[in-house]
């Protein structure tokens, strides 16, 4: 995140319609290379790419992600700190600072870091990139 961004978090959402296509991330070539994402393996590939880009000091913005997911594991999956920590059908809530507050496994509440939520909207998969400080 940039120095002039909110002290809490920013939540960026990009709606992906067109099921049955693969996902591509990283329009910023300096951040990381585009990745084809078929299913669960693709999610792990994306997380590895994001982790590597963050290690190089890249701060994400809305335009970094143009994602279409082909059959994720459930209508809503939370990937936090590079790991899938919630996979179910319930709502994912964030507090006033944008941090996930539930439902999350024990010990995950209020944790700082970054994550991605994938949620079926009825028209397509909504991809939200969450980054906290």
Image (spheres, rainbow, N blue to C red):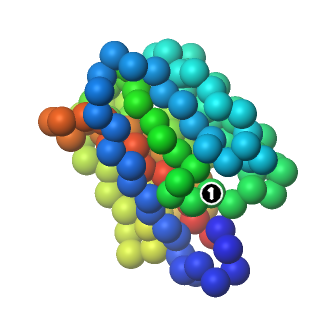
Badge 1 local density, few (<14 within 10 Å), some, or many (20+)? Answer: many
For residue 32, which quarter of the picture? top right
> Which residue of the protein is positioned furthest toward the right in this rendering?
56
Q: Which residue lies at the image location 57% right of the left edge and 21% below the top edge?
A: 36
Q: Which residue lies at the image location 64% right of the left edge and 84% below the top edge?
A: 4
Q: Which residue is mark 1?
A: 60
- Quadrant where the N terminus sits is bottom right
1 vs 45: above or below: below
Provide residue 60's location: percent of width, then percent of height: 62, 57
Seen from the viewer's position, the closer of residues 70 and 133 is 70
SS class, disc 1: loop
7 vs 93: above or below: below
Residue 60 appears anywhere in the view = yes
> Which residue of the protein is positioned furthest toward the bottom in this rendering?
4
Direction from residue 69 to residue 83 in the image, left or right = right
Q: Which residue lies at the image location 58% right of the left edge and 65% below the top edge?
A: 132
Residue 103 appears anywhere in the view = no
């Amino acid at each position: 995140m940039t120095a002039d961004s909110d002290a809490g978090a920013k939540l960026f959402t990009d709606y992906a319609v067109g099921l049955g296509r693969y996902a591509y991330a990283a329009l910023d070539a300096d951040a990381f290379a585009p990745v084809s994402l078929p299913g669960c393996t693709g999610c792990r590939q994306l997380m590895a790419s994001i982790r590597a880009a963050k290690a190089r000091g890249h701060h994400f913005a809305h335009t970094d992600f143009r994602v279409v997911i082909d059959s994720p594991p459930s209508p809503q999956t939370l990937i936090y700190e590079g790991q899938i920590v919630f996979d179910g059908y319930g709502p994912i809530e964030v507090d006033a600072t944008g941090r996930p507050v539930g439902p999350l496994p024990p010990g995950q509440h209020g944790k700082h870091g970054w994550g991605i939520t994938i949620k079926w909207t009825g028209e397509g998969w909504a991809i939200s990139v969450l980054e906290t400080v």
